[in-house]
Image (tube, rainbow, N blue to C red):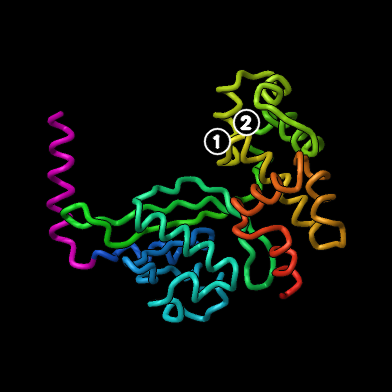
């Protein structure tokens, strides 16, 4: 208890001495695989890092400042991001490890885990939000732990169109459910369920570049029906499969 008090006192003392509360901005500029931003109560960008500016196709960060997601991203992605921001600003909702597929200006898809949380003043009132979005890198096959889950990963990649359960993946890896969850987090920074979703939607995004119907793609990617596929796709990508297809084609 005493240690916690000292820690809190040290934080308060240092916080009172810091001249620039945005001191971390240059640090985030040095992280090419992390998007960082602060927004005000109206959802307008106040601080961003260079990675976000580059992902938005801008030469410098100034082009983003003072704008909302709705003004930066093309419809319907902008509205989706704006609604997500509003939920944080209005209701104080925490967004933690939200698996998202982003479509960048060059139309290349990129997977990331997003975090957003409200910023509060000294009285607890919400005055803005902060967020980071971290790219999901390819798994390191040289990681000594990788071989322990390799069979489960292979099962996901080969059988994603079939119903897959966590106990089934654990048996394949000769692990308990708790063990396989721990190893997936250590190696991929994903849960097994997120890995299944990611694999299915990666396949779906490739198929959407072709001419197959959305219903056929849903079935091919392991979804019971068109509506279940659309709900999952929209929750992860921010747009419907049909809208994503249009965005891919430059619509």
Q: Which residues are magenta?
A: 1-20
Q: Position of residue 52 (x, y in %)?
A: 50, 68
Residue under the image location 64 percent in, 19 percent down:
175
Magenta-drawn stretch contains 87: no
Instruction: Assign a secondary structure to mark 2.
Output: loop
Which residue appears at 85% of the width and 50% of the height?
A: 216
- Residue 149 quadrant: top right
Q: Is residue 77 left or right of residue 38?
A: right
Residue at 35% over, 57% down: 90
Please tell me how crowded label 1 is: few (under 14), some (14-19), or many (20+) other residues with Cα within 10 Å. some
Q: Nearer the viewer, residue 108 or 147?
A: 108
Earlier-in-chain disc, 2 versus 1: 2
Comparing 16 with 204, the one in front is 204
Give the farthest residue toward the right. Answer: 211
x and y, in percent, of residue 251 in the image: 71, 75
What is the C-alpha distance between the residues marked 2 and 1?
A: 9 Å
> How many badges with numbers are in the image?
2
Describe the element under mark 1 as helix, strand or loop.
helix
Q: Which residue is mark 2?
A: 145
Instruction: Please give the residue where the numbered disc 1 appears in the rendered image.
Output: 186
> Looking at the picture, does residue 146 appear above or below residue 204?
above
């Amino acid at each position: 208890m005493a240690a916690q008090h000292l820690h809190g006192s040290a934080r308060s003392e240092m916080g009172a001495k810091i001249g620039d509360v945005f001191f971390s901005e240059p640090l985030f500029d040095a992280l090419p695989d992390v998007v960082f931003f602060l927004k005000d109560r109206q959802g307008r960008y106040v601080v961003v890092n260079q990675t976000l500016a580059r992902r938005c196709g801008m030469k410098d960060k100034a082009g983003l400042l003072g704008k909302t997601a709705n003004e930066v991203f093309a419809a319907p992605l902008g509205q989706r991001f704006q609604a997500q921001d509003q939920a944080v600003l209005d209701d104080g909702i925490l967004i933690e490890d939200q698996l998202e597929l982003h479509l960048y200006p060059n139309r290349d898809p990129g997977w990331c885990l997003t975090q957003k949380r409200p910023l509060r003043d000294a009285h607890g009132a919400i005055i803005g939000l902060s967020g980071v979005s971290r790219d999901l890198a390819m798994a390191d096959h040289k990681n000594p732990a990788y071989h322990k889950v390799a069979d489960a990963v292979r099962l996901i990649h080969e059988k994603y169109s079939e119903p897959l359960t966590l106990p089934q993946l654990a048996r394949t890896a000769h692990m308990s459910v708790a063990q396989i969850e721990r190893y997936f987090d250590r190696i991929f920074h994903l849960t097994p369920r997120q890995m299944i979703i990611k694999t299915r939607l990666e396949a779906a995004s490739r198929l959407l570049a072709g001419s197959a119907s959305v219903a056929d793609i849903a079935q091919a990617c392991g979804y019971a029906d068109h509506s279940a596929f659309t709900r999952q796709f929209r929750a992860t990508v921010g747009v419907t499969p049909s809208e994503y297809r249009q965005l891919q084609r430059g619509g």
